[in-house]
Image (cartoon, grey):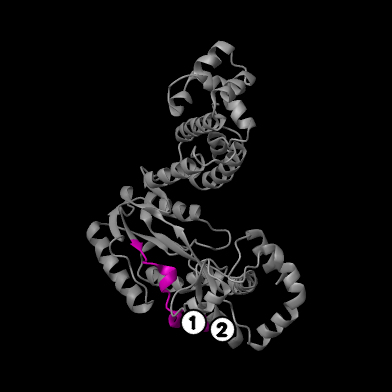
Amino acid sequence: MERAWKQVKSNKGAAGVDGMEIGDFPDFAKEHWERILQKLANGSYSPSPVRSVQIPKDGGKYRHLGIPTVLDRVIQQAISQALTPLYEPHFSDHSHGFRPERSAHDAIDEMLRESNIKGAKSHVVDCDLAAFFDTVNHQKLMGKLRERIADPALLKLIHGYLKAGVIPSKLSREEREEERQVRNEGVPQGGPLSPLLANILLDELDHELEKRGHKFVRYADDFVILCWSLRAGERILRSVTKYLSDELKLTVNTTKSQVVKLRDASFLGFEIVHRRIWWTKKSQKKFKDRIKEITKRTRGHSPTKVTAELRMYVRGAMNYYAKGMKCGEARDLDKWMRSRMRLYYWKQWGRPRTRRWKLLRLGIGRGEVHKVSRSRKGPWRISHTSIVHRAMTIAWLESQGLPSIEKQWCSIRYPNGKKRPTG
């Protein structure tokens, strides 16, 4: 349990329906832990419902996320830690999602290896499971768990987590029980146990595809199957759709699932073109849209806070996307992001008097300062002028905390320092 608590603490996360924050848990545990352990031992512990929040997706849609209480996250994490060694050796080598020492990069690397084999299969079956975490069949999943778990108390506890209700966010205490929605299917996406339960259920699919001799790669509920031709792919898609429906009680999204040529396929935000991995146009748009959102000039946040947000986002995004990004793309994105920040500073400075004072402090001559501070040009055009560039140099922007996309690309792709940014 102590190891589980350390993991939950490091993951941070929001409060559940009881309002308890991560920092409040140690005091709560000191007072109630013995009683909780006793309930877990005799099977009388009842999980709390999860707090439902909606995360925006592409196309104006939302993904439902269930946030368990901190206590339930600790218990779920402990269960996951106990069950992972039991199931991990039996999982397929073609499954990469939410597993130790595996990642999305491993999944796309395997797809590349399979496609580079001489006489490789040239088409891809891209199968999309409709709302997978919301439609997991409880009876089927519990049946899979009983195959390896003999402890009835543990099975009862897991079943309790599956059946725990969902309460929408922003409700008063009085409204919560009235609005509690009992779950008859689905795994609450957001708890530490959910990824393992998803892999346990979909492991049956993995072994079925292996038995049929298919070349496939799966990451959580996203998977692709490589095949010889369009006709073969359509036949595989029909067969797999029927198997998922009949055996696992899962639904395939027929509008999104398709058979395409390898060069037209996308998987986990990447694509394979000319035997190389590149990030997709959709991923590029997502990357730029997020930076636009952070540097939106009407936000009203201080530049210090904006650059801190950029550092956090760019670090995580580059760790993921640098694998499929060209150096020239990183350099161009750097220039674009610097322009966004120059524009942000210019808008923050506001009045002509403030702008003149700031430019003078940054070493621009009085004649040029007067000219640019009184210009009728729009802020975006002003931010591209040579005067503003000489004032807010690359070195100055980096001294203010602005991250460098190109430098991060170089450090990720060339960790030994063989390639240097051009600056």
Residue that protrudes farthest toward the left in the picture:
231
Q: Nearer the viewer, residue 252 or 34?
A: 34
Q: Which residue is painted at 53% across and 63% down in the image?
A: 98
Residue that protrudes farthest toward the top in the picture:
367
Q: Is residue 149 left or right of residue 210?
A: right
Q: Which residue is painted at 29% across and 70% down in the image?
A: 239
Q: Is residue 278 left or right of residue 238?
A: right
Magenta residues, as a range?
Answer: 127-149
Q: Position of residue 345 (x, y in %)?
A: 55, 31
Residue 15 shown in magenta: no
- Kindly identify which numbered label has been placed on residue 142: 1
Q: Quadrant of the C terminus?
A: top right
65 versus 119 height, above or below: below
The kind of residue tagged 1 is Met
The kind of residue tagged 2 is Leu
Mark 2 neighbour class, 10 Å CA radius: few under 14, some 14 to 19, many 20 or more:
some
419 versus 291 height, above or below: above
Dot 1 lies on which element? Answer: helix
Q: Position of residue 108 (x, y in %)?
A: 44, 53
Residue linked to disc 2:
155
Residue that protrudes farthest toward the right in the picture:
30
Q: Position of residue 141 (x, y in %)?
A: 46, 79
Residue 136 shown in magenta: yes
Q: Which numbered disc flags the more N-terminal residue, 1 or 2?
A: 1
Q: Is residue 251 left or right of residue 191?
A: left
Q: Are marks 1 and 2 in contact (CB under 8 Å)?
A: yes
Mark 1 neighbour class, 10 Å CA radius: few under 14, some 14 to 19, many 20 or more:
some
- Residue 355 visible in image: yes
Q: Position of residue 383 (x, y in %)?
A: 48, 26
| CA distance for labels 1 and 2 | 8 Å
Q: Nearer the viewer, residue 24 or 192?
A: 24
